[in-house]
Image (cartoon, rainbow, N blue to C red):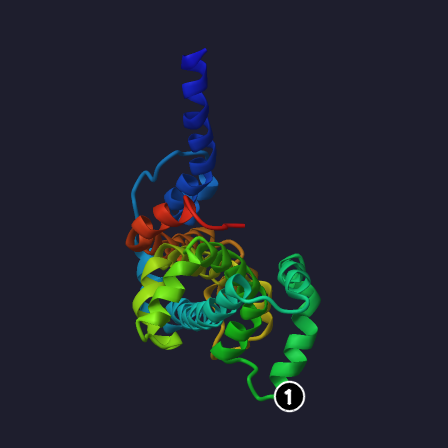
Amino acid sequence: MNRRVSIVPLAFALFVLTPVWWLVAMSFKSNKEIFSGLTLWPAAPDLSNFRLILTDPDWYGGYINAAIYVAINVAISVGVAIPAAYAFSRRRFVGQRALFFGLLSFRMMAPAILLTPFVQITSDLGLFDTHLAVALAHCFFNVPLAIWILEGFISAVPRQVDESAFLDGHSLPQFFRRILLPMIAPGIAVTAFFCFMFSWVEYLLANGLTAVHAKPIAGIMTRAGGVLAADVALLAAASVLGLLPGLVLIVFVRNHLARGFSMGRVT
C-alpha cells in the first residue's frame, strides 16, 4: 500500500511535466523533424529558433512589452492593496463585510466581458496601445485578489504591535515602512507572485488593448501562427522563452513563497 501511494506523486509529476518536456523538445527540433514522426528528444538539437527570436526586435520586443506592463501592474496592485488590506483588517466601517466579500465578484468576472468597455475607455483617454492601459485593466482583477491575500497576513499581526509602535512615537507611514512591511514580507511576495502570474498569462485584454507598440509576446505568437502556421518549432521556442520569467521569479522569491503559502489567506 505504501509503495502504491508513493507512486502517485511521481505519476502526477510525469503527467504534468510531459507537455512541458514535449514543448522544450520541439523548440530544439526543425519543422521537418517534428512532422516526420514521434521522437522524445531532438535528433540534431538546433538553436536557430531561439537565435531568431532573440535577434529579431519584432519577437523579443513582445517579451519586453509584457514585462513592462506586468511590472507596472504588480507595483500598482501591491501598492494599492497594502493600505486597503490594512483598513479592512484594523478598521470597522459600514458595509465592510459586504464590500470585502464583494471584491471576490471581480475575480469571478471573465475578462472577455470587460474587453469592449476597456477598449472604449482607453481609446477616449488616449491610452490605447500603451503598457499603462494593459496594467490598469489587469488591476481590475489583481487588486481584489491582492487585498484578500494581504488582509490575512495583516490580521495575523497582533494589534498590540500597532499600539506599541504608535505609543513609541511612530507615525502611520513609519509604522508601515519599519515594522509592518518587514513582518508581512512573505505575504507581499505571495501577492506579487499571484499578480505576476495573472498579468503574464492573461491574453485577451493584453492583446485587445494593444496594436503595435505595446503588443505582448502572446499576441505576436498568435499573429505569427496565422501567417506561419507550419512553423511549429519557432512557436515552441517562443513558448519556452515565455516560461522563463515565471521560473526566474520563483527562484528569487522561493523562500518568501514557502513561508507565505504556509500562513495568511491565499485564495
Q: Is residue 223 visible?
A: no
Say which amino acid is labelled 1: Asp
Residue 135 in percent (x, y) is at 50, 73
Viewed as shown, does residue 149 lie left or right of 10? right
Q: Which residue is mark 1?
A: 124
Of 111 and 227, which appears nearest the observer?
111
Q: Which residue corresponds to the image point at 67% horizontal and 81% vertical from the top-left?
A: 120
- Above or below, 13 against 134 in this view is above
- The quadrant in which the N terminus is found is top left
User: Which corner quadrant of the image does residue 24 belong to?
Assistant: top left
Q: Residue furthest front?
A: 167
- Above or below, 29 against 4 in this view is below
User: Which corner quadrant of the image does residue 186 belong to?
Assistant: bottom left
Query: Alpha-carbon neighbours of circle 1 within 10 Å: few (<14), some, or many (≥20)?
Result: few
Residue 156 in percent (x, y) is at 44, 53
Residue 216 in percent (x, y) is at 48, 68
Of 161 and 63, which appears nearest the observer?
161
Of 17 and 265, which appears nearest the observer?
265
Of 230 and 203, which appears nearest the observer?
203
Residue 37 in percent (x, y) is at 46, 35
- Above or below, 1 against 35 in this view is above
Q: How many marks?
A: 1
User: Which corner quadrant of the image does residue 162 belong to?
Assistant: bottom left
- Above or below, 7 against 248 in this view is above
Secondary structure under tag 1 reads helix
Q: Is residue 170 visible?
A: yes
Q: Which residue corresponds to the image point at 29% horizontal and 45% vertical from the top-left?
A: 45
